[in-house]
Amino acid sequence: MPNRLALVLAVALLSAAQTSGAEIQLEDCELVGSQGIAKIEALCGWFERPEDPADPTSTHISLKIAVIPALSPNPKTDAFTIINGGPGGSSIDMYADSAQVFTSIHRDRDILLIDQRGTGDSNPLDCPDLENVNTSYSEESVRHATQQCLQDLPGDPRFYTTSVAVRDLEAAREALGYARLSVYGVSYGTRVAQHYARRYPQSIRALIIDGVVPPEVPLGPNAALNAQRTLDRLFDRCAEDRSCNTRFPDLAAHLSALRTRLTEAPVQLQLDHPLTGIPETLELTYAHLALTLRMLSYAPETISLLPLIIEEAYGSENYTPIATNALRILTQVTGAIRYGMHNSVVCSEDIPFLGEVDTEALEQTYMGQDQVLALQTICEQWPQGPVDDDLRKPLDTAVPTLILSGEEDPITPPIYGDMAAEHLPNSRHLVGKGQGHGVVARGCFPLLISKFIDTTDLATLDTSCIERLDYPAFFVNLMGPPP
């Protein structure tokens, strides 16, 4: 970015901020992707907000803001903003890792990024000890880790809910002087995006929700049921594929036997950490396998590995693929989530609305009920925050809305997109064949969202290009798919 352009934009944005009564001073900065490779020039600053939105005199927290100025000398008056999921993920980090997806949008519109309070660098609410819930559960250990986390948090966890976060986003829009926002949300971010559209209909120009969380569906038990659906469909496709069925004829039975084996007798392994290369000892349990099954189901490239990973462990007692994937996931994925913020959302907006949980159905899934039990244990102690009365009602708006789903999404299946579409008269639901969670970067979807944001015309959007998406070929051995 030329320094002259950065200076001009910084002066303009600062002027708008001062006019609105808020101050956001932006300076040249560099956004760095999670791998330390991608680097994006931007303008960054801090937005001071009362932690308790009902009390302007309460302790103030600093929200991290980044603006990537439009390439055009005459940008549109609406900015494009991205809301990450989790709950607990950083929107700024997400953009740094996927900026190329939004290149065409960036040509004519500023990109506005805000780390939602409690995430990224916005007064992050971390709970390092609770990250271990991903691989083990005991009521005593979760209860102790929750108490420790609540003692160590740098803020009051009540005030990190969706209902508070949308107020921050609107205040930032006003402070920076944007006429309206075009909003993209993914996963939990779709809940935030939908609620922002509900609260501030005059401030939103267009909406893209990818991997939809319907407001009326609480996060929790459905995670295991949806994950099992995706795995069952994978096994069915393998049975219908000649090469896969020949190589892996009894996947479901072998996974069941493997579950029993690892539950009764965890395996001691010596291996190099896949990311650091540092040798370490790992007691491999079934929880590591369940974590691997779940997270590799999120993307078509990795889900195609699962039959081979299961068979290597079952038939050859080669547990290294499970171990290396579990260690990588624990480092990359769970390390990116701020669990304190996650708990503030889930314990206020989801767990109180679960109703009666069908534990028998959960036990029939490969994930079981440990995740739900852990959340219930955490939420018994976690203070609940403000939740708008209509947060959990379906969004009903005429705002142009593009709904995106992955056919094989293990957490937010296409039926969730259908549920949202029922109440959105000016919407269109696109499903990516063979795709997982979050499809915006897949195939021609970057082109489609760019055209949609440019025109907001859903009727003339030519979506025939997504028909070229398909299921990935199964890996039948360590060399890859059959020729």
Image: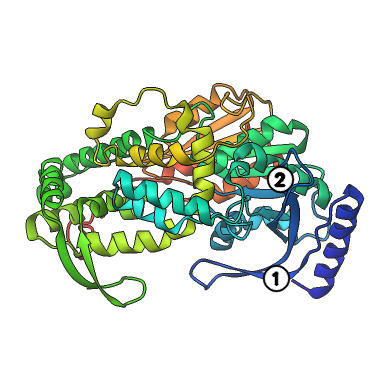
Q: Which mark is residue 29?
A: 1
Q: Quarter of the image containing the N terminus?
A: bottom right
Q: Which mark is residue 71?
A: none
- The answer to which image quadrant residue 408 occupies is top left
On screen, residue 49 versus residue 145, left or right, reads: right
Residue count near mark 2 (Cα–Cα under 10 Å), binned few <14, some 14–19, many ≥20 = many
Q: Which mark is residue 169?
A: 2
Residue 32 position in % (x across, y down)? 58, 69
Say which of 346 and 299 sits in front. Answer: 346
Residue 245 position in % (x across, y down)? 13, 45
Q: Quarter of the image containing the C terminus?
A: bottom left
Q: Secondary structure beneath disc 1?
A: strand
Q: Amino acid at mark 2?
A: Leu
Say which of 129 and 455 sits in front. Answer: 129
Residue 467 position in % (x across, y down)? 43, 41
Residue count near mark 1 (Cα–Cα under 10 Å), binned few <14, some 14–19, many ≥20 = some
Residue farthest to the bottom?
A: 278
Residue 162 position in % (x across, y down)? 61, 39
Say which of 32 and 240 sits in front. Answer: 32
Q: Residue at x 47, y 50 (%)?
A: 442
Q: Secondary structure beneath disc 2?
A: helix
Q: Is residue 85 visible?
A: no
Callout in the foreground (2, 1): 2
Residue farthest to the left?
A: 315
Q: Residue at x 23, y 66 (%)?
A: 282
